[in-house]
Image (cartoon, rainbow, N blue to C red):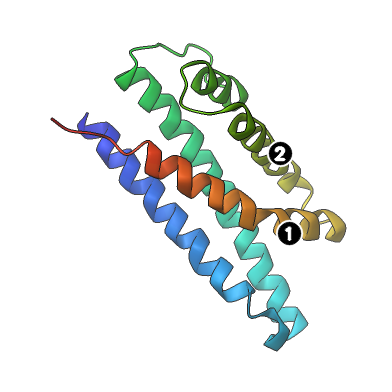
């Protein structure tokens, strides 16, 4: 479980880095529009890697704690298995799927409207990821 603890710490660092930028972007009314766009883009990038790290950690958690092998490491499948094992509620599964949808849209970030929509969704995504990470803290006996 040492690998699990190490991965968990990395997920927490990513969540903290996302929180850091969220705190900055909430001050946007005092920010030059050009600077705001740079902060927003940083927010989206941090969302990308945090969401990636979370589902990969969830996969490892399920494999190590529940002893369920996941042969096809596809994010949506990992979240469905997490729901099936009781780690996620139906509503949380829907939130996870929305995160995946937004994550997949980030490749179209050059479109301003999409960037704005994703940035607007990130505070809720952050809350979800933080709650799930806290729930999945590795337990050592």
Residue at (63%, 73%) from the top-left corner?
25
Most extreme residue toward the left is 141
67 on left or right of 52: left
- Residue 79: give x, y in percent of width and height: 56, 25
Location of residue 51 with respect to 66 vertically, above or below: below
- Gap in Å between the C-alphas at discs 1 and 2? 15 Å
Residue at (55%, 46%) from the top-left corner?
128
140 on left or right of 50: left
- Residue 75: give x, y in percent of width and height: 58, 27
Residue at (44%, 25%) from the top-left corner?
59
- Residue 103: give x, y in percent of width and height: 67, 42
Q: Quadrant location of residue 34?
A: bottom right
Q: Name the disc covering residue 104, or none.
A: 2
Give the crowd class for mark 2: few <14, some 14-19, many >=20 residues within 10 Å: few
Q: Name the disc covering residue 78, or none.
A: none
Question: Is the Cβ of the residue at disc 1 closer than 8 Å to that at disc 2?
Answer: no
Viewer-side label of 1, 2: 1
Identify which residue, 12 or 44, lies in the foreground: 12
Mark 1 residue element = helix
Q: Earlier in the sequence, mark 1 or mark 2?
A: 2
69 on left or right of 43: left
Give the crowd class for mark 1: few <14, some 14-19, many >=20 residues within 10 Å: few
Residue behind mark 1: 120
Identify which residue, 32 or 94, lies in the foreground: 94
């Amino acid at each position: 479980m040492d690998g699990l603890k190490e991965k968990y710490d990395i997920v927490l660092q990513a969540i903290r880095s996302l929180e850091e930028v969220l705190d900055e972007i909430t001050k946007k009314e005092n920010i030059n529009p050009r600077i705001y766009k740079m902060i927003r883009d940083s927010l989206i990038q941090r969302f990308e890697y945090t969401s990636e790290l979370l589902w990969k950690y969830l996969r490892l958690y399920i494999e190590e704690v529940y002893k369920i092998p996941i042969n096809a490491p596809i994010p949506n499948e990992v979240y469905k298995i997490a729901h099936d094992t009781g780690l996620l509620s139906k509503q949380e599964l829907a939130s996870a799927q929305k995160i995946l949808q937004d994550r997949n849209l980030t490749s179209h970030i050059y479109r301003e409207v999409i960037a704005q929509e994703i940035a607007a969704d990130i505070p809720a995504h952050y809350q979800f990821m933080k709650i799930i990470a806290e729930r999945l803290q590795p337990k050592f006996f």
